[in-house]
Image (spheres, rainbow, N blue to C red):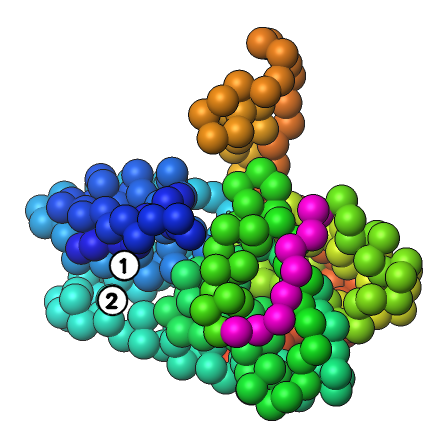
């Protein structure tokens, strides 16, 4: 299978050929492919490549990244298909097709919440690169733009991997949607100027009470939106829900290597030995959210998806 190498975008369209599940697991770990739905889909195709080592492959792929639950849902679905003797490639194709369909529905439901002439703030990349279709948060932006409701999009650059600057900017430009990238630290200034009408972000795992793990910095936007009375929306398909967890406190948060902070494009910036904390995600409390939009519709707080 071939993966578009998201580490090389937007400057280079480089494709990485994965010949076995080990290479797919490494591509997920090193973020050649990233975004919660996309890593679930990639893992599903990785399992198509597994042969007699199917169980080891399922375990190995599950160990690639810890936070996005889509990965584990997709692997479980493939494990069940394998046990039932179903065709694995068809199963992976159907996981991908379902993700695309869910994105389209999220876009339609979410666009109804976007006010006329809106200035929208978003973070990370939640578009086609991160999903199988139009995207989740970016799918809402795309759909609302198509309806003539979007004046401008502000995309947080999303330190340290710069998914906003590199990937969201690339997708917005391709679509001709007017936007500016801001440093993450400019978000409060933007709110203070009254320049944000609507905030929308994706999710990597949503607990039963609506607590949402998403890219580091999302909780900061939710706190700002709450303080300033601006609606903050999370957009995610049902494959992002983990209703076995009562609250977000139980969501495992990935901590990535120090070099993502201490170096830029391979060039060391920090003093040698500089200590670093590099969590890849944070958890936004469900009560800070105006709504969670799924393929089933618009859900309002208080959220309660479990039997907790
Ligand atoms: O570390 P990443 O780039 O995989 O993180 C991605 C995000 O946080 C996205 O917002 C999330 O996966 C939703 S993608 C539709």
- Per the rendering, the mark at residue 92 is 2
Residue 226: image location, x then y, percent: 86, 63
- Horizontally, residue 46 falls left or right of residue 7, namely left
Q: Are marks 1 and 2 in contact (CB under 8 Å)?
A: yes
What is the quadrant of residue 307 in the picture?
bottom right
CA gap between label 1 and label 2 equals 5 Å
Of labels 1 and 2, earlier in sequence is: 1
Task: Please name the residue shown 85% across and 53% down the image.
Answer: 189
- Report helix, strand or loop for mark 1: helix
Residue 297, by quadrant, is bottom right
Task: Answer with left or right where residue 134 lies relative to residue 138.
Answer: left
Q: Report x, y in % for residue 99.
A: 39, 73
> 292 and 118: which one is in front?
118
Please report the residue visible at 32 percent of the width from the left and 76 percent of the height from the top: 97
Residue 253 appears in the picture as rendered:
no
Position of 140 relative to 250 (above/below): below
Magenta includes 182?
yes
* Residue denoted by label 1: 44
Crowdedness near tag 2: few (<14), some (14–19) or many (≥20) residues, C-alpha within 10 Å = many
Residue extent of the magenta highlight: 176-184
Query: Which one is nearer the viewer's eye here, 57 or 156?
Result: 156
Q: Residue furthest left?
A: 52
């Amino acid at each position: 299978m071939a993966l578009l190498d998201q580490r090389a975008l937007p400057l280079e369209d480089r494709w990485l050929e994965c010949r076995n599940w080990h290479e797919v697991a490494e591509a997920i770990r090193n973020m050649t492919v990233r975004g919660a739905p996309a890593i679930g889909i990639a893992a599903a195709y990785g399992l198509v490549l597994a042969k007699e080592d199917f169980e080891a492959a399922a375990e190995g792929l599950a160990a690639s990244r810890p936070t996005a639950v889509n990965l584990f849902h997709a692997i479980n679905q493939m494990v069940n298909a394998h046990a039932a003797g179903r065709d694995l490639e068809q199963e992976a194709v159907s996981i991908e097709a379902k993700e695309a369909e869910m994105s389209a529905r999220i876009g339609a439901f979410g666009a109804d919440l976007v006010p006329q002439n809106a200035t929208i703030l978003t973070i990370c990349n939640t578009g086609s690169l991160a999903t199988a279709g139009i995207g989740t948060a970016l799918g809402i932006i795309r759909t609302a733009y198509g309806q003539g409701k979007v004046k401008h999009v502000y995309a947080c650059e999303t330190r340290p991997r710069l998914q906003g600057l590199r990937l969201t900017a690339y997708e917005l430009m391709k679509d001709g949607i007017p936007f500016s990238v801001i440093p993450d630290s400019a978000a409060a200034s933007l709110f203070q100027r009254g320049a944000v009408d609507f905030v929308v972000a994706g999710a990597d795992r949503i607990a039963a009470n609506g607590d949402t793990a998403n890219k580091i910095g999302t909780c900061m936007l939710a706190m700002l939106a709450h303080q300033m009375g601006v609606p903050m929306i999370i957009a995610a398909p049902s494959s992002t829900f983990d209703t076995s967890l009562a609250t977000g406190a139980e969501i495992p948060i990935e901590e990535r290597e120090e070099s993502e902070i201490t170096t830029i494009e391979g060039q060391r910036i920090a003093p040698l030995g500089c200590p670093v904390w590099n969590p890849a995600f944070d958890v936004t409390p469900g009560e800070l959210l105006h709504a969670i939009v799924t393929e089933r519709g618009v859900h309002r707080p208080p959220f309660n998806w479990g039997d907790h």
